[in-house]
Image (cartoon, rainbow, N blue to C red):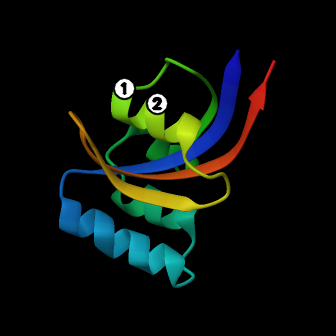
Amino acid sequence: MKSAIVRHILVKDKDLCEQLKKKIKDGADFAKIAKQHSTCPSAKKGGELGDIKKGQLVAPIDKAVFTLAERELHGPIKSQFGWHLLEIKFRMDF
């Protein structure tokens, strides 16, 4: 089974998502940005989703988590909930 440690930011607007991505790439703290802007309940934990199993997240996010490069910032990625930024800390198979 595949598993990943992920943190993410969810916002309603693609432009805002792109602005936040630029801030993080320019050195802003991911956790602080998540706490300030994310509409997901994970915002309280700096965007930490914890240990995610394949199939737990909505399809576009699940696909991104298990196919995109680790230790990079990805997004904006669209789902029915809005626009996401993802940081895949690492993946494991067990």
Give the CA separation, mark 1 to mark 2.
6 Å
Residue underneath mark 1: 58
The residue most toward the front is 67
Residue situated in front as seen by the camera: 37 or 14? 14
The crowding category of the residue bearing disc 2, from other C-alpha atoms within 10 Å (few below 14, some 14 to 19, many at least 20), is some
Q: Identify the residue shown where x is 37% and y is 40%.
A: 40
Residue reaching furthest right?
94
Task: Identify the residue position indicated by label 2 in the image.
Answer: 62
Of residues 13 and 36, the one nearer the viewer is 13
- Left or right for 20, reference 11: right
Q: Position of residue 83 (x, y in %)?
A: 27, 50
Q: Quadrant of residue 4?
A: top right
| 1 and 2 marks in contact (CB < 8 Å) | yes
* Image-based side of 12 in relation to 94, left or right: left
Q: Is residue 56 above or below residue 65?
A: above
Q: Secondary structure at mark 2?
A: helix
Residue at 18 percent across and 58 percent down: it is 13
Q: Residue at x 56, y 47 (%)?
A: 7
Residue 49 drawn at (x, y percent): 56, 36
Drawn side of residue 73 relative to residue 11, left or right? right
The N terminus sits in image quarter: top right
Name the quadrant of the C terminus.
Answer: top right
Question: The disc labelled 1 sits on which kind of residue?
Answer: Val
Residue 5 percent coordinates (x, y)? 67, 38
Is disc 1 placed on a helix, strand or loop? loop
Residue drawn at the location 49% of the way across and 19% of the way down: 56
> What kind of residue is marked 2?
Asp
